[in-house]
Amino acid sequence: MIKFLDLQKINAQYSEELKQAASEVIDSGWYLLGERVDQFEKNLAEYIGSKHAIGVANGLDALRLILKAYIEMGIMQEGDEVIVPANTYIASILAITDNRLKPVLVEPDINTYNLDISLIEENITERTKAIMVVHLYGRVCWSEELDRIGKKYNLKIIEDNAQAIGAIYSHPNRAERKTQNVVRDRKTGSLGDAAGFSFYPGKNLGALGDGGAVTTDDDELAKVVRALANYGSGEKYVFDYQGLNSRVDEIQAAFLNIKLKYLDTENQRRREIAQYYLDNIINPDIILPNSDFSLSHVWHLFVIRTKHRDKFQKYLTENDIQTLIHYPTPPHKQNAYKNWSNLEFPITEEIHSEVLSLPISPILSDKELKKVVVFINKFTT
């Protein structure tokens, strides 16, 4: 069986380092808010190119805490609107509704699956306070137009960077970049006002359990997020906010410090696998992802589309190739948001009905990769 993602094999590459790190944490007697967390936050901030990184319990909490902090800072209040892609994992939206803010769902671009930036401005109202962009599947969702809209309407731009750590945004006009000192090459997580990260084990940078982080250049936001994540306390037994308990622990921080060193190498292998798929899958029933194939994609997922998804997935399973669907049901059709059931987002619904994720991970061998492509090209309807 070619697994969709073999976490055991991925972590086996670094098993000695991971075991040593675990042993050191155990022997230290210090398991929360210690040296390993401090070091990981510094390493992550340096890697991303942000001023601050705050370790939290998971990716959903990272987004929840950003919004909660903006409310505490008086920048947002209950009932304010946040523009968010209709085509996303539900966590992006849960973070908004959990803070009693109103998600305004906007269709994606069918060519990128990311938020269609050209539709943002028509959805802005006097209650709009933020745009949440999701770098879905590992592809950068950013543009100079997005930046312009944010500045024009004084909106916070929040990145859901759960799937795209290591992806790089480059200004499209290189001559302009050189002459005007506009936007240098920057990693996702440093593009907007704040960003949320997930270190769920299956992510490109995955812990051996849950973990997350917030990055920002805003000193005040960082201070409030850090306090909110620690019961609302910035000083022991002094509680300025009604906070949460959301902290990455020492052992996960130690693991993430190790795996961060190898992230760029692993992302590059993902790009090689994606390039092979793009060059060699020639089945006319398969719609391949559109990509300019720059550093702007880290291929957390390689997602194809087909009108015959169920039949195609069953065929691959019968030939020992594991695939997954990201995601079968869009948020506005979930029971959790049943009051949205009458809403129609045809592009989002088309995507969710057709997508299938092929095996892609840094430990996928060339032999396995070729087998996947052979069987895909043999598939007939």
Image (cartoon, grey):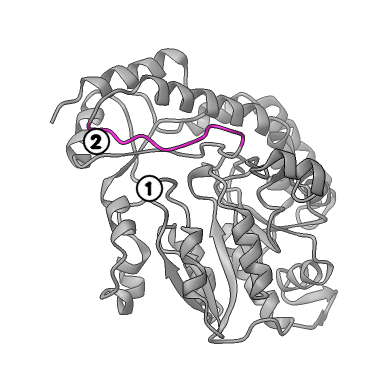
- The residue closer to the viewer here, 37 or 293, is 293
Q: From the viewer's perspective, is 305 left or right of 162? A: left
Q: Residue at x 36, y 34 (%)?
A: 288
- For badge 1, the amino acid type reads His
Q: Which residue is mark 1?
A: 326
Q: Residue at x 47, y 73 (%)?
A: 122
Q: Is residue 294 above or below residue 307?
A: above
Residue 164 image offset from top left, x and y in percent: 58, 45
- Disc 2, disc 1: CB below 8 Å? no
Residue 313's disc is 2
What secondary structure is marked by label 2?
Answer: helix
- Outermost residue to the top: 367
Q: Is residue 182 magenta?
A: no
| Quadrant of the image occupied by residue 204 | top right
Residue 62 seen anywhere in this rendered image of the structure: no
- For badge 2, the amino acid type reads Gln
The span shown in magenta is 285-295
Q: Residue at x 56, y 37 (%)?
A: 298
Residue 287 image offset from top left, x and y in percent: 31, 36
Which secondary structure class fits the magenta region best? Answer: loop
Residue 221 seen anywhere in this rendered image of the structure: yes
Q: Is residue 196 above or below residue 20?
A: below
Residue 337 image offset from top left, x and y in percent: 35, 74
Q: Label 2 to label 1, Cα distance in Å?
A: 13 Å
Q: Determine crowd level at label 1: few under 14, some 14-19, many 20+ residues with C-alpha closer than 10 A.
A: some
Q: From the viewer's perspective, is 233 left or right of 146? A: right
Q: Determine crowd level at label 2: few under 14, some 14-19, many 20+ residues with C-alpha closer than 10 A.
A: some
Q: Residue at x 63, y 64 (%)?
A: 158
